[in-house]
Image: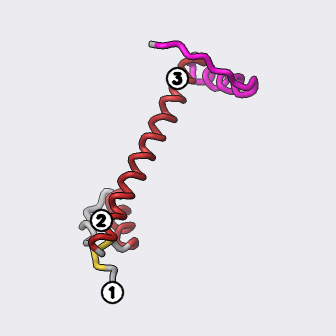
Amino acid sequence: MTTTSLKLPDDLKKRAANVAGQLGISTHAFMVTAIEQAALAAERRARLLAEAKVARHEMIETGKGFEADAVHAYLGAKAAGKPASKPKARTWRG
């Protein structure tokens, strides 16, 4: 494990220490967790954007896509634990 030094504004360091104390953990543990969560969020966003670019390319190449209302209904049913049929891709080019 490596050591890293952070220069934080006084108010941010106090806030981190206060929250860490409320959680019953050290300020160090709080900061490590915060950095880990930020890195994970950035990695997930990068994957989402890469997948979106591939999906956009496929949609442009095939001329097919999914109707937003059908996708929203499908996801809503799945989130509610109800059975749902996957929406079908439709041609969107004339």
**Which of the two discs, 1 and 3, sits closer to the camera?**
1
Q: Quadrant of residue 4?
A: top right
Tell me which label, 2 or 3, sits earlier in the chain. Answer: 3
- Report the amino acid beneath label 1: Gly
| Residue drawn at the location 44% of the way across and 13% of the way down | 1
Q: Could you say which is closer to the camera, residue 19 or residue 55? A: 55
Q: Amino acid at mark 2?
A: Glu
Element assignment for label 3: helix
Q: Position of residue 80 (x, y in %)?
A: 35, 58
Instruction: Provide the residue span drawn in magenta.
Output: 2-25
| Tag 3 residue | 32
Classed neighbour count for the residue bearing mark 1: other residues with Cα under 10 Å, few (<14), some (14–19), many (≥20): few
Q: Which residue is mark 2?
A: 58
Q: Are marks 1 and 3 in contact (CB under 8 Å)?
A: no
**Marks 2/3: CA–CA distance:** 39 Å
- Kindly report the distance in space between the C-alpha atoms of the residues bearing marks 2 and 1: 17 Å
Seen in the picture, residue 32 relative to 89 is either above or below; the reply is above
